[in-house]
Image: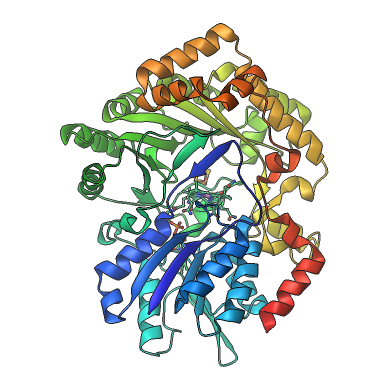
Amino acid sequence: MHIILTTPPEYRDLTTPAQVLGPPIGLLYMASYARHYGYLKKTNSTIEIYDAFTEHIKHEQFVRDIIEKKPDVIGTTVTSRMFLVTMSCLARIHHALPETKIVLGGIHPTFTAKKIIETFPFVDCIIKGEAEKSFSELLLAYYNNEDVSKVKGITVFKNGLFIDNEPDTMKNLDEIPFPARDLVDNVRYGYTWNGVDLTYGKFTAIVTSRGCPFTCKFCTNWMFANRSLRVRSIENIISELELLQAEGYKSCVIIDDIFTFDKKRVIELCRQIKEKKINLVFYCEGRVDSNDPEMFKAMKEAGFSSIMFGIESGSQKILDHYQKGIKPEITKLAVKNAKDAGLHAIGAFIIGAIPETKNDVKETLKHIHELELDGLEVNALGMAPWDPLYQKIEYEKKTKEHDWMRDHLVSEYYDNFTQEELAKYVEDAYYSFFRIGILNNIKKMARGFFNHPDARHAILRCIFNYNAWKVAKEGGKPTHKIEEILMNGNDLEFMDEKHLKKLMIESKN
Ligand code: B12
Ligand code: SF4
């Protein structure tokens, strides 16, 4: 069999000044599992990764490419944002290749599996949750022409019956072989801004733990594995890092939900990175309540360059509403401690909660200004269709029939902010970040220049980059249109009823 695992293609040009391109680690894990445990051999299969998202492949091109490759199985990972464009492509692929099995997985299908199978019958099945083992078992069942209904996590319609099995959660992460990065060797990953590299050299992503025990209201990551946090052993992580170093990688982002949760574990990992002379630049995310100076110091010494904190808001009322369990004072301490240790502190914020007032937003803007962060990300509050808030709105019959097919801004259903106001606040937030005076901005750059190889590289590249000068002249004014700020390129056009009906008719054929 020939198997293609893909990320979704683009509907329209999503090229924005900031590009965040990371490898599809979930798909690479599924491929490595199938290869390592002999499923590819047993099923006489070859496996290919087609990272259409990173390569900015347009939907027409995607359909043409897949039809030409004629896979026996195509497995696609889908986020809510890319769901409709993906369905449109898969409907056409199914039309041309009716024998090809179409399998979906990832966060959106995990929580909307039954609805997808009912609405888009060309989808053969969905595997919910973590799918390394289940996907391999599915391939074996397909190859042997056996019943697939025993596969863990599967949702499938068979002989007039819905099979909807409980998802698998990988218990011992050390048993999963390292992601098959060799399958995306020809794809260039990294974060860039206006064409300037923000990450350093050959770049990849790594997962050292899975799951999150917290239950922040604006995030549904914790639902994915039912709050079960599992960690890899330090030895296992170190082996992967040594391999990355040998393969010429220079930097890597840790994409765990809560990497810094266990201070002792982080310190021990950092100690071993130093001891084994692993020379990589690391980026990670963290909660502000994990703010220990000793941990940050160990991270800096091990090669960590930056940490992105989920700060969310400057208003205690809104933080409590989010059930975030932090306080602005704790954030100040975390940012200070991280910066004192020589790390770049980046803050992620959200604007647009239901009880949020203009005063709360003002508090957030003030917080951003006072924190003197090294980097900033601000988003309007969105929600997925399995978000408890969305369920409430659905229960109140405020949603439309097809709304489960994409993510939403909370402001679509509540009128505390207009879309324009929200976009304006997001812009204002970026202004607050830059409004710290020329001297402080120069100081900030100098700190980056002397402390971080990636920042040094980026600053030097900026000097020769016309766009960077242009943005600097405009005082860091975001150049996005309102809808880009709000939805960042959502395939909203696919929600046009005419288009959607055409897609539904196509999918039933
Ligand atoms: C790293 C990351 C990225 C990276 C890499 C994405 C990628 N293709 O892997 C980058 C930076 C590129 C990215 C981009 C985006 N991301 Co992102 N990302 C993540 C993050 C932090 C980790 C994903 C990951 O690699 N996890 C580790 C692996 C092992 O787990 P996994 O990916 O879930 O894969 C397992 C299962 O899902 C399943 N599976 C996955 N795919 C498939 C496919 C098949 C066929 C099967 C059977 C099973 C299966 O098996 C895998 C192995 O166990 C998640 C948060 C999270 N905790 O999941 C957000 C997250 C997935 N991203 C999100 C969003 C919104 C985006 C963007 C839309 C952001 C943007 N504004 O552009 C884009 C869209 C990308 C896309 N291709 O659709 C949201 C999705 C929310 C939603 N409702 O859909 C999440 C959940 C974050 C959040 N809480 O908001 N992202
Ligand atoms: S925001 Fe972070 S800590 Fe909160 S639930 Fe999501 S992943 Fe967990």
Q: How many marks?
A: 0
> Between residues 385 and 242, which one lies in front from this camera angle?
242
Given residues 454 and 105, the one toward you in this image is 454
Expressed as whole percent of the image width and height from the top left, the position of residue 91 reads 63, 75
Q: Residue at x 51, y 42 (%)?
A: 20
Query: Which quadrant does the N terminus fall into?
Result: bottom left
Q: Please, which colouring scheme is shown?
A: rainbow
Report whether 241 appears left or right of 129: left
> Which percent across, then down, holds residue 117?
61, 77
Task: Estimate the x, y position of residue 97 in percent, counting from the top left.
Answer: 54, 81
Whether residue 179 is visible, yes or no, is no
Query: Above or below — where is 291 with respect to 21?
Result: above
- Quadrant assignment, res 268: top left
Location of residue 437 (image quadrant): top right
Reply above or below: 252 against 432.
Answer: below
Q: Residue at x 59, y 72 (%)?
A: 90
Screen quadrant of the C terminus: bottom right
Furthest residue toward left: 275
417 displayed left or right of 59: right
Residue at 81% in and 59% down: 398
Q: Is residue 432 above or below residue 386?
A: above
Res. 302 in view: yes
- Place of residue 73 in the rendered image (x, y in percent of width and height, measured from the top left): 45, 76
Using the image as rendered, state which of residue 186 and residue 299 is in the foreground.
Answer: 186
Q: Residue furthest bottom?
A: 159
